Amino acid sequence: MSPELLHFSDEAAPARRLAEAAGLIARVVERHRFPDEELKLRMPFTAANDTPETLVVFRSLDRPNEKLVELLLVARDARSRGARRVVLVAPYLAYMRQDIAFQPGEIVSQTIVGGFLAELFDAVITVDPHLHRIERLDQAIPGEHAIALSGAPRLAELIAAKRPGALLLGPDEEALQWVRQAAAATGLDYGACRKVRHGDRDVSIALPALDVEGRQVVLMDDVASSGHTLAGAARRLLEAGAVSVDVAVTHALFADDALAVIAASGVGEVWSTDCIAHASNAITMAPVLARALQDVLKCVD
Ligand SMILES: O=P(O)(O)OC[C@H]1O[C@H](OP(=O)(O)OP(=O)(O)O)[C@H](O)[C@@H]1O
């Protein structure tokens, strides 16, 4: 039986785009949440021997606490039905930021959640995981098939079409890796701001030594969460004479009032990939994910 892709209805659009690009049948896992917040899941397999040997599970891990339980239930159930290979495509991967104990007693969730996913899945494919002090995803998710892709080339295509001639800026030095990739693909000028984080919603941004006056600027980052990083950078840029500031991010988390915070700073357009299903999605990662998935399906056994 050919591999199939399982997804949940709230992510039907990006999951189906991936299934189509990878040539897989997409099937929905039905989900009911009880008043006490327990979950009941129903697989699309009902008869004996109707479960493919290889299953791909699509679940992006924004709102991770509930979704990690879903993954536990789906992966274990798939194996009990006879699936031999279960692959996770999680375009956004959660719990990667706590990679050391910053204070004595803090739990290093990256290692624990990474180990949990490695036990459940034969391969994990994700996009721009937020790795700080480690370089490779397999240091967080042990195993041969922990694959980290980047959203930057797709965002570069989008930016080149929407703002040819723009200046690409990272709102902090960590974002230099993405603007550099995008600049290499498009030939656009690039640079990065410096950021000091004082709290979850409190950052200071300093502009690089570049002339931004009269420039259209596109801020690129891996993730927008509270929106304060992008808003802080946009305010500085507009004060310094940029004619417009737009935003392109891989992961559209946009917690709480983040979009309003960003808009209030003077940002024009907000574009994101469909790693996290969101109204700002402007470009799909499906072709990139599909290529990686096809390669993985040839290797996992
Ligand atoms: O929308 P926000 O709530 O501002 O969060 C988004 C920012 O957070 C992350 O970096 P972080 O500040 O963790 O930087 P670090 O990786 O250097 O700690 C990410 O790379 C963004 O720049």
Image (spheres, rainbow, N blue to C red):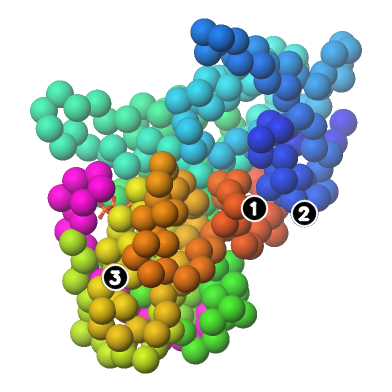
Ligand 1 neighbours mark 1 (CB distance < 8 Å) = no
In the displayed structure image, the side of residue 195 where residue 287 appears, left or right? right
CA neighbours of label 3 inside 10 A, class few (<14), some (14 to 19), many (20+)? some
Q: Could you tell me if residue 275 is visible in this image?
A: yes
Residue 176: image location, x then y, percent:
34, 70
Ligand 1 neighbours mark 3 (CB distance < 8 Å) = no
Amino acid type, residue under disc 3 in the picture? Arg
Q: CA distance from mark 3 to mark 1?
A: 34 Å
CA neighbours of label 2 inside 10 A, class few (<14), some (14 to 19), many (20+)? some
Boundaries of the magenta span:
185-203
Q: Earlier in the sequence, mark 3 or mark 1?
A: 3
Residue 258: image location, x then y, percent:
40, 50
Q: Residue at x 50, y 23 (%)?
A: 66
Amino acid type, residue under disc 1 in the picture? Leu
Residue 46: image location, x then y, percent:
85, 13
Q: Nearer the viewer, residue 266 or 60?
A: 266
